Amino acid sequence: MSNTVLSNAEEQGPVLVCSNVAKTYEEGPETVQVLSDVNLEVQPRQRLAIVGSSGSGKTTLLNILAGLDSPTSGSVLLQGEELSSLNETARARLRNRNLGFVYQFHHLLPEFSALENVAMPLLIRKELSVKEAQRRSVELLEQVGLGHRIKHRPAELSGGERQRVAIARALVGKPSLVLMDEPTGNLDPHTAEKVHEVLVALTQEVATSFIVVTHDMEFAKTMDDVYRLSEGSLALS
Ligand SMILES: Nc1ncnc2c1ncn2[C@@H]1O[C@H](COP(=O)(O)OP(=O)(O)O)[C@@H](O)[C@H]1O
Ligand SMILES: [Mg+2]
């Protein structure tokens, strides 16, 4: 846990509780068990890394934690809500309010500027004026060191800059939890290092919990806890 003063959020209990999650895929006559018994509790502001070899089920797990895929058995509570008990609309709403995502590939919208891409989650929520959404988005872009690139489209940005825009977009809505799936997996080592620096600073600053899947052990160790996914379950590394 980070050594921050207890906030109101921390009195509300864990952001995420994942209990006895199993996941099997049917592949023709074969059943492949990817996850067998995953248990995890994430506290407000806790930052944790998940490492594990390729094919160990890290992406499958993140998709289940996000309610994008359902477990074969077990339960996932996000902000106290059992994901499997919600219909798709309610789950999408819970995701939009509580979760941010960063993937290996940025998934930015090519026709839109960095600023417009970052503002998108706020505009979908329809709670703020466009002006206020833009103000917050500029603030986030400045935090990731891209204050001078706000009007650029993804094609006019470098790989590292695009990932930083994706990070700003994941954080702009002040989610309670951000899930990152190998956020620097597609970058050269030098650029990855720069993005890690931004992430380390940012994850310490904002009042958000983080689960970061990474292959970079040095980066993983900058988080509060490091878990390893192996043989279908998670253990502190
Ligand atoms: N939709 C699917 N159908 C069948 N098998 C899948 C599916 N998605 C993933 N798998 C299998 O589950 C295992 C874990 O995949 P994944 O979660 O992507 O691992 P990781 O992200 O750790 O590399 C792999 O063996 C993969 O082939
Ligand atoms: Mg993966």
Image: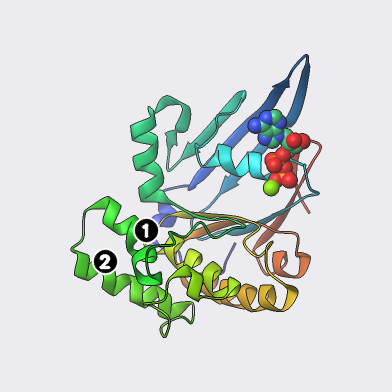
Q: Which residue is mark 1?
A: 8
Q: How much space separates mark 1 and mark 2, taking CA atoms?
A: 25 Å
The spot of residue 212 in percent (x, y) is 62, 57
Amino acid type at mark 1: Asn
Q: Residue at x 38, y 77 (%)?
A: 150
Q: Secondary structure at mark 2?
A: helix
Crowd rating for badge 1 (residues with CA inside 10 Å; few <14, some 14–19, many 20+): few
The spot of residue 50 in percent (x, y) is 69, 53
Q: Residue at x 27, y 51 (%)?
A: 125
Callout 2: CB less than 8 Å from ligand 2: no
Identify which residue, 226 or 212, lies in the foreground: 212
The spot of residue 148 in percent (x, y) is 42, 85
Q: Is residue 103 left or right of residue 147?
A: right
Marks 1 and 2: CB-CB under 8 Å?
Answer: no
Residue 80 drawn above or below residue 72: below
- Residue at the far left: name it: 129
Compare marks 1 and 2 and give the one earlier in the sequence: 1
Which quadrant of the figure has residue 74? top right
Which quadrant of the figure has residue 90? top left
Identify which residue, 191 or 23, lies in the foreground: 191
Q: Secondary structure at mark 1?
A: helix
Crowd rating for badge 2 (residues with CA inside 10 Å; few <14, some 14–19, many 20+): many
- What numbered label is drawn on residue 237? none
Residue 160 drawn above or below residue 105: below
Q: Is residue 40 visible?
A: no
Amino acid type at mark 2: Ala
- What numbered label is drawn on residue 133? 2
Q: Is residue 49 left or right of residue 43?
A: right
- Residue at the far bottom: name it: 148
The spot of residue 214 in percent (x, y) is 70, 59
Quarter of the N terminus within the rendering = bottom right
